[in-house]
Image (cartoon, grey):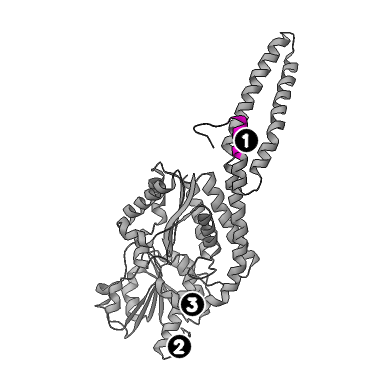
Amino acid sequence: MHLAVIGLSHRTAPVEIRERLSIPEQTMEVSLQQLRADDQVLEASILSTCNRLEIYTLLRHPELGISAVGSFLSRHSGLGVAELEPHLFTFHHEEAVAHLLRVSAGLDSLVLGEGQILSQVKKMVRLGQEHRSVGPILNRLMNQAVSTGKRVRTETNLGTGAVSISSAAVELAQLKVGQARGLDQLVSLEDEQVAVVGAGRMARLLLQHLAAKGCRGVVLLNRTVQRAEQMAADFPALPVQCRPISDLDHCLSTCSLVFTSTAADEPIIDATRLGPLNRRSSLMLVDIGVPRNIASDVSGLAGVQRYDVDDLQEVVNRNQEARREMAQEAEAMLAEEARLFLEWWDGLEAVPVLNRLRRQLEDIRESELQKALSRMGPDLSSRERKVVEALSKGIINKILHNPVTQLRAPQSRPQRHANIRALSELFDLHEASDEV
């Protein structure tokens, strides 16, 4: 068995590639079933966010399994394997474990230390369990990743004041509004007419940060107005007008700053829609949806500025340096947590040989017990027979105690392999195939 993660992220692929591989929750079960349909994939779990698509797997054979996952990604995205390969990364065993722990802790995020990724990893665990695509190995690894993410945020200051994709989007708007005024700094948004399209988790964070950055009011558009109203009720200090998505054209005509964060598969704003509108002289569109909500062709329209998640790097870099020392502290914790998982994983290598040893000793016990009982004759009572059988089982358990303890104890991999080989040779435990 072989652990591997195959995927791409904001570090390896632009948003136009990432959006092709995005897997929404409503199709997650089908995607997991397709992965597990290949006999090379023993366990699988998928992490799909605006900045990454990663598939964590337990494979029979590393090369064949990775090829199977690559074929799945190609079919899902409609991109050829040759087109995908430059953007994909693959980590094996120790590197795969370390990568997942870094992701869960927020150390691999665009915004260093972001908190939202931990809830996304929790969601990955839940979906993998619900759809029965994970077994004991990935289940253990992913749950340890969740507990590690919590530990990092509890025992370090990395999560203190950590910004999110949404807050970075608001800061980008502040920076661009300031630059339009000839200032290279973040400015208040109090003079902007602001709209937010969507009422999900990212939109909630947008409202939170807009309120903190001086915004005087927001138009919140959603397909379900009731859901928008429920969200708006959580921000009593921020005036929020809730409108149906059918009012989008009116908002694009009257607002100067529009944020989009919806689960739409196709752009909801493009040049065809914007062109005929009687708009204000300037319109800034900030798209944090993946797949993107705003088509790239709007950038060719006069007075329109368009930004997406890949443009957030400009403001992220301004905050990154202050968090690097905190990240180093967290890295030490991740190394410890990775070691604990790998020791547990290495201990599994001893299971087949220990199972064979137990079967061998049990066969001997049964054979010798029957011989002894037959010699003792029919006068032996049922109670006495049970005592003799319990005695034989106790002896076997005592014999097995030290080998089991030693082979499962923390030790270097070469030492463990040497001990397994020695036990196999001494008791002639070699078999063509094993059950784990």
Residue 117 in percent (x, y) is at 51, 63
- Name which residue lies at 64% across and 27% down: 361
Tag shown at residue 184: 2
Q: Is residue 141 found left or right of 190 in the rendered image?
A: right
Amino acid on which the number 2 mark rests in the picture: Asp
Mark 1 and mark 3: Cα distance apart in space: 55 Å
Tag shown at residue 367: none
Residue 322 in percent (x, y) is at 57, 77
Classify the position of the C terminus by image quarter. top right
Q: Nearer the viewer, mark 2 or mark 1?
A: 1
**In-front residue for pair 14/351:** 351
Q: Is residue 427 found left or right of 97 in the rendered image?
A: right
Q: Choose the circle earlier in sequence order: 2 or 1.
A: 2
Mark 2 and mark 3: Cα distance apart in space: 14 Å
Decide whether the magenta segment is chiefly helix, strand or loop: helix
**Residue 8 position by quadrant:** bottom left
Q: Which residue is mark 3?
A: 317
SS at circle 3: helix
Q: Which residues are magenta?
A: 420-430
Q: Please identify the residue farthest to the bottom as the structure is shown.
A: 182
